[in-house]
Image (cartoon, grey):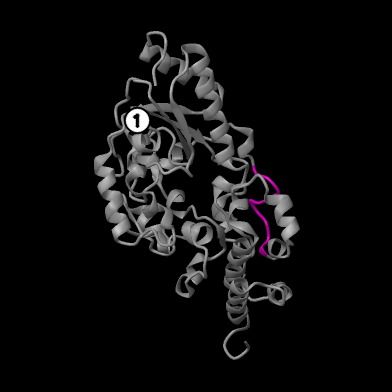
Amino acid sequence: MTRPAPLDPAAAKRQLAARARELGFDRIGVAPIDIAQDEQHLLRWLDAGFHGEMEYMRRHGLMRSRPQDLAPGTISVVSARMDYWPQDAREPEAVLGDAGAGYISRYALGRDYHKVLRGALARLARELAQQIGPFGYRVCVDSAPVLEKALARDAGLGWIGKHTNLISREAGSWFFLGEILTDLPLPPDAPASAHCGTCTACIAACPTQAIVGPYRLDARRCIAYLTIEHHSAIPVALRPAMGNRIYGCDDCQLVCPWNKFAHAASHPDFKVRHGLDAARLTELFAWTEARFEERMRGSAIYRIGYEKWSRNIAVALGNAPTSAAVIAALERRRGEASPLLREHIDWALARQRGPGLT
């Protein structure tokens, strides 16, 4: 990866930062690629089995902690932050307190962030290449095997909190991350220092006790994992604690005191779509697969598919206050349900009807 003219790394970085802001990013930083300590943490996490059904985490091996293996020639990582807090959405606490509504993680109320960030990062890299000449790069957004939070920390964007999310002193934790792996020798930023102190609010708030210790998340108990990454039946013992959370979970972020500094999303694609901030469970469960395709295409939720979406809602209906409407909604779907969905419907019906009325 050679370029025809001398490069001014500091100038290139300034150009990146200026254009990134114009493209909707709220901050960028640059990190070196050595995250050896995080690699050891990853290996311990995998050895503990905390990854659950996410076998791709183990399959990728050490590539996740070695960006130069993912994109040969990489010597710098540009980490970019884009805020997503949907200020106009119904208050999350109000939705969580309304057992007849479906709670959807704040990040998934708008368009699929993968597409938004990937497109903006790719454009950022292309435009820089037009100005300074060709260089090697790869754009990554979540789905690529990269330890993005460790790299973002080393790029100065924030520290990894006890809930394992990245936290910024200036913006809390309601933001997306994306990366450009590059062979440009860009000046690195100073790593962010940690500021959780003695606070353990996130650990106490987790509905399923998935945060088994500071900086240790057992994904097998995490509602975000269970509703998104987990493909099989949700463990029965964890279903009651899921409440009305049908896609993801924000509880650990909602109690974080640093989120008083959170910024509202400026990008229009993160505005609430289809009334998902206050949708009724019975209405969502009545969707046909065609309606799911119509409403969710272009959303991060689309990735889990109709069956898992219905499975999650069935659990929430089982946790809802007993009513004839909920029972009727469950019964309507039972006859044509897949074996996976039917098992969750039967569990929900048993909860609704009570002992001896199943």
Residue at x-position 42% and y-position 64%: 208
Relative height, residue 220 to residue 10 (above, below): below
Residue at x-position 70% and y-position 66%: 282
Along the line of sight, the residue nearer the viewer: 178 or 60: 60
Along the line of sight, the residue nearer the viewer: 109 or 137: 137
**Residue labelled with disc 1:** 156
Relative height, residue 174 to residue 30 (above, below): below
Secondary-structure class at tag 1: loop
The secondary structure making up most of the magenta span is loop
Asked where in the image residue 168 lies, by quadrant, the reply is top left
Q: Position of residue 195 (x, y in %)?
A: 30, 40
| Residue 70 seen in the current view | yes
Considering every residue shown, the one lying at the far top of the view is 5
Q: Is residue 57 magenta?
A: no
Q: Is residue 277 magenta?
A: yes
Along the line of sight, the residue nearer the viewer: 165 or 325: 165
Residue at x-position 46% and y-position 15%: 15
Q: Position of residue 270 (x, y in %)?
A: 61, 39
Q: Position of residue 26 (x, y in %)?
A: 49, 28
Q: Position of residue 142 (x, y in %)?
A: 47, 43
| Left or right for 60, reference 291 | left
Magenta part of the protein: which range? Answer: 272-281
Crowd band around label 1 with a 10 angstrom C-alpha radius: few (<14), some (14–19), many (20+): many
Considering every residue shown, the one lying at the far bottom of the view is 356
Q: Quadrant of the C terminus?
A: bottom right
| Residue 213 seen in the current view | no
Asked where in the image residue 64 lies, by quadrant, the reply is top left
Along the line of sight, the residue nearer the viewer: 32 or 263: 32
Relative height, residue 171 to residue 53 (above, below): above
